[in-house]
Amino acid sequence: MNRILLTLSITFGIVFTLGLWIPFKAMVAQELLTLAWAESQARQTAKKPWPWADTWPVARLQLGESAQPLIVLAGAHSESLAFGPGHVTGSAEPGMAGPVVIAGHRDTHFGALQDMRVDSTIRLQSRQGTWIDYRVTRLRIVDSRQEAMNLVDMADNSLLLVTCYPFNGIDNQGPLRYLVEARRIS
């Protein structure tokens, strides 16, 4: 009986510790990324947040008026998304003409998307330091096996935020995506 309790305690401890590691890493990374963003702004060059990083800050994103801004990284690959939302390669750079697409993990940085509503405000700061305001126009769930993202069909003044769905799901390889579509406010 004691051996079973010990085994269960150790198992629970490992699962609990690993479950907290990802949000902790995401939170600490945003602090380091904020420093790299400030240096990038001051020097007007891309600054890696740590020497071995394969990404760098490209924008700052604020999901709602009272939310803490998030640093957006170059690329939306799994290695960078562990540290912050990622700018999808092929979409327009924040502040430039064309649709901007940013992806993030539902259980860390983009968990707040579940609280977004139509007409919510999203702010995006470009490398040049300019804040661009967007208004949420549509929220939807898509099956990535049936609907591909087509930048050609998106308006030049649009912002698309993408994360996995459902927000409380266990499977992190599922096909459903939660999309927040927004338009630039003139």
Image: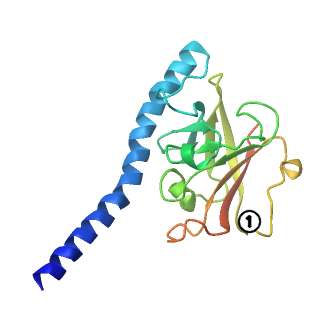
- Pointer 1: residues within 10 angstroms few (<14), some, or many (20+)? some
Q: Residue at x 67, y 39 (%)?
A: 133
Residue at the extreme front of the image, as rendered: 3
Q: Residue at x 55, y 65 (%)?
A: 172
Where does residue 65 sit, x and y in percent of width and height?
Answer: 53, 44
Q: Quadrant of the N terminus?
A: bottom left
Secondary structure beneath label 1: loop
Type of the residue with mark 1: Ser
Name the foreground residue: 56 vs 140. 56
Tally of numbered discs = 1
Give the image location of residue 167, x and y in percent.
53, 66
Q: Nearer the viewer, residue 83 or 153?
A: 83
The quarter of the image holding the C terminus is top right
Q: Quadrant of residue 6?
A: bottom left
User: What is the image's colouring?
Assistant: rainbow
Taking depth in this image into account, of 11 and 44 the one nearest to the observer is 11
* Residue 81 point in image, percent of width and height: 55, 47
Position of 133 with respect to 156 (left or right) is left
User: Can you see residue 94?
Assistant: yes
Residue that mark 1 sits on: 144
Residue furthest left in the image:
2
Rendered view: 170 above or below 73:
below
From the viewer's perspective, is 132 left or right of 12?
right
86 w.r.t. 150: above or below: above
* Residue depicted at 57% across the width and 31% down the height: 57
Can residue 64 be seen here? The reply is no
Residue 10 placed where, x, y %? 22, 68
Residue 139, located in which quarter of the rendered image? bottom right
